[in-house]
Amino acid sequence: MTTFVLPGRHQPPHNDHLALIRAALDVVPSPLLVGVVFQRAPQGEPADAFEAEARAQHAPERCPFTVAQRIELLETALDETLPGRARDRVRVIPLPRPEAEWPLVQALLPGARAWIVPDVGESFDDAKAAFFRARGDRVLRVALRPTTDGRVVRSLLGDPERLARHVPAGVARRIDLWRRTEDKEMTP
């Protein structure tokens, strides 16, 4: 049996992530694992441009949420936006960054794997697909017309009204609650 995996940082999960998940559910015959990718401290210099970009994707300024927070936000988004049977087909898991932790990923996901990679014309997505194929795994490219991106969404974290245009309502509420709680804790 093939394990279908859609990896992503989900910093935070936004509407395009959910559109990609829905599109993937249309083409995968078995449960879909949505991997919330995290990076441990990288060692040494990047081996190539792909590794350098992968590390840049995980730079602290691009990662305002912990793995646990991202999983919570993604579960909230899925519960809110996917109908019953579709929701039952999705499992959210923490996933070490495959480019840095391939042996660990193989141990966590043994057997045949198929990776869901968006097809939006970005060179980084093309490089991810090539990475998985070079390791003997299948890749399913899922067409997506982007309506936002993570940088835009992260720039709106302090503006709940504008943020709510890019993320499900439950995600926006949870982020706003965390921000207000954080502000109160920092106020003397």
Image (spheres, rainbow, N blue to C red):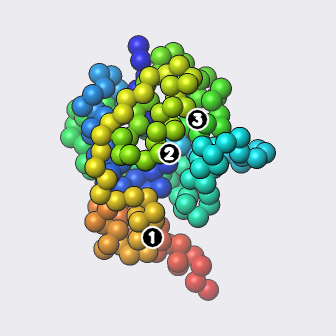
Marks 3 and 1, how far apart at CA: 27 Å
Q: Residue at x 59, y 79 (%)?
A: 186
Residue 124, numbered label: 2
Label 3 secondary element: loop
Label 1 secondary element: helix
Quarter occupied by residue 22: top left
On the image, the x and y values in percent for residue 161 come to 31, 74
On the image, the x and y values in percent for residue 96 come to 59, 38
Above or below, comparing residue 31 to residue 23 in the picture = above
Marks 2 and 1, how far apart at CA: 21 Å
Quarter occupied by residue 21: top left
Above or below, comparing residue 161 to residue 167 in the picture = below
Disc 2 residue crowd, few under 14, some 14–19, many 20+, Cα 10 Å:
few
- Earlier in the chain: of badge 3 and badge 1, it is 3
Marks 3 and 2, how far apart at CA: 14 Å
On the image, the x and y values in percent for residue 31 come to 35, 26
Above or below, comparing residue 10 to residue 172 in the picture = above
Name the residue beneath numbered marker 1: 155
Amino acid type at image mark 2: Phe
Residue 98, numbered label: 3
On the image, the x and y values in percent for residue 14 come to 36, 55
